[in-house]
Image (cartoon, rainbow, N blue to C red):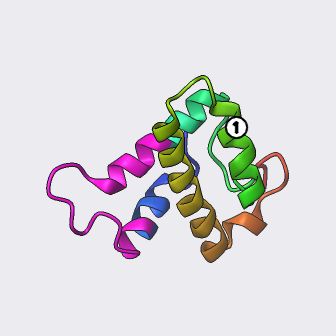
């Protein structure tokens, strides 16, 4: 599960992600990679899970052996967009450590 998924989609679209896609949708790819992170870590995607660049690197390391290197790099890109989204929208600061309001 991706908390704020619809807002995330809108955010990355507003940043121009996927505007030149002719075959596959980059927006859908980013969402798919976040779902892979969720599956690989067995955690929901929340602003608190992806709270910093350091957390992104830790999460990426936890995916080694579960996914190919290229997939992990794509997951990192999707997580970086999610982190930017969480910062811009203020979602990073509105939830507690456990993702509870």
- Is residue 77 left or right of 83 when viewed as pictured? left
**x and y, in percent, of residue 95 in the image:** 77, 59
Q: Quadrant of residue 60?
A: top right
Residue 49 seen in this snapshot:
no
User: Which secondary structure lies at badge 1?
Assistant: helix
**Residue depicted at x 85% and y 51%:** 97
Establish if 8 lies above or below 59.
below
Q: Quadrant of residue 21?
A: bottom left
**x and y, in percent, of residue 29 in the image:** 36, 47
Q: Quadrant of residue 51?
A: bottom right
- Is residue 58 left or right of 1 when viewed as pictured? right
Residue with the most extreme top position: 65
**Residue depicted at x 61% and y 23%:** 65
**Residue depicted at x 77% and y 55%:** 54
**Residue depicted at x 38% and y 75%:** 14
In what quadrant of the picture does the N terminus appear?
top right
**x and y, in percent, of residue 59 in the image:** 70, 41
Q: Is residue 14 magenta?
A: yes
**Numbered range of the magenta stretch:** 12-33
Task: Tell me the residue that label 1 is attached to.
Answer: 61
Residue with the most extreme right position: 97
In what quadrant of the picture does the C terminus appear?
bottom right
Residue with the most extreme left position: 22
Establish if 59 lies above or below 68.
below
Residue 16 seen in this snapshot:
yes
Q: Nearer the viewer, residue 92 or 79?
A: 79
Q: Nearer the viewer, residue 52 or 85?
A: 52
Q: Is residue 46 magenta?
A: no
- Is residue 23 left or right of 93 when viewed as pictured? left
Give the total of numbered labels: 1
- Is residue 69 left or right of 61 when viewed as pictured? left
């Amino acid at each position: 599960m991706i908390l704020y998924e619809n807002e995330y989609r809108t955010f990355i679209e507003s940043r121009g992600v996927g505007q030149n896609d002719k075959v596959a949708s980059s927006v859908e790819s980013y969402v798919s990679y976040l779902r892979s992170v969720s599956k690989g870590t067995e955690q929901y995607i929340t602003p608190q899970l992806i709270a910093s660049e350091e957390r992104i690197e830790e999460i990426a390391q936890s995916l080694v052996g579960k996914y190919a290197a290229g997939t992990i790099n794509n997951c990192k890109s999707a997580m970086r967009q999610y982190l930017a989204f969480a910062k811009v929208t203020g979602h990073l600061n509105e939830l507690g450590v456990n993702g509870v309001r």
